[in-house]
Amino acid sequence: MTDTRPEAHTETFTLDRMETPVGEMLIVTDSDGAVRALDFADFEARMHKLLARHAPGATLTPGHAPEAVRRAIVAYFDGDVRALDALPVKTKGTPFQSEVWAALRAIPVGETRSYGQLAAAIGRPNAVRAVGLANGSNPVGVIVPCHRVIGANGTLTGYAGGLKRKRWLLAHEAANAS
């Protein structure tokens, strides 16, 4: 019998850790310098789970992310809230997830969108729940700004990094967007 399962990747990624005003961040980069995962240290298990889903078989080696990535993260938290916009990310979600993640990156700094608005932006206005699931599967938080998605009534809704962080990130971006 032939094995038809997708072949696991044997990539090696670098895992870096950086302190930020909202806690220690985990930065996973590949050999090309693309960010493969970005999460908060207190959600490390979640990051590993998402990474295993998007890069099966990949191994993590402690080290430093490329200086350009580290500088951009420092600049973001220092008030240059557009510093993350040009960082390369590489994710291997489904085509639908990739669409949602691209739409997230298109939300301007200092603005928010509801799940319904995000679904409409990708031309699938009835896919609100699916958009929410794709948003929650984003392995590159903050850079792919899933924190900019709020409830239809304007309330802060779930965020993998916690609502306190979501509130901080949105206030930080609003204060520095001009």
Image (cartoon, rainbow, N blue to C red):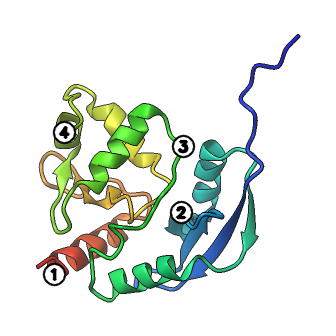
Q: Is residue 26 left or right of residue 119?
A: right
Helix or strand or loop: what does disc 3 sit on?
Answer: loop
Disc 4 residue type (three-letter) = Ala
Residue identifier under label 4: 121
> Which residue was labeled with disc 2?
34
Q: Is residue 11 above or below residue 28?
A: above
Q: Nearer the N terminus, badge 4 or badge 1?
A: 4
Secondary structure state at the residue bearing disc 2: loop
First-in-chain label (1 vs 3): 3
Q: Give me the residue at 33% from left, 60% from top.
A: 145
From the viewer's perspective, is the residue at label 2 or at label 4 nearer? 2
Q: Residue furthest bottom?
A: 78
Closest to the camera, between mark 2 and mark 3, is: 2
Q: Quadrant of the N terminus?
A: top right
Rendering coords of residue 87 (x, y %): 42, 67
Q: CA distance from mark 1 to mark 2?
A: 28 Å
* Amino acid of disc 2: Ala
Q: Residue at x 68, y 69 (%)?
A: 14
Indicate the amino acid at tag 3: Lys
For disc 1, the marked residue is 175
- Say what secondary structure mark 4 lies in: helix
Q: Give how far across and how far down residue 99 sits, in percent.
A: 35, 39
**1 left or right, relative to 4:** right
Q: Nearer the viewer, mark 4 or mark 1?
A: 4
- The picture places residue 112, in percent across and down from the top left corner, at 18, 58
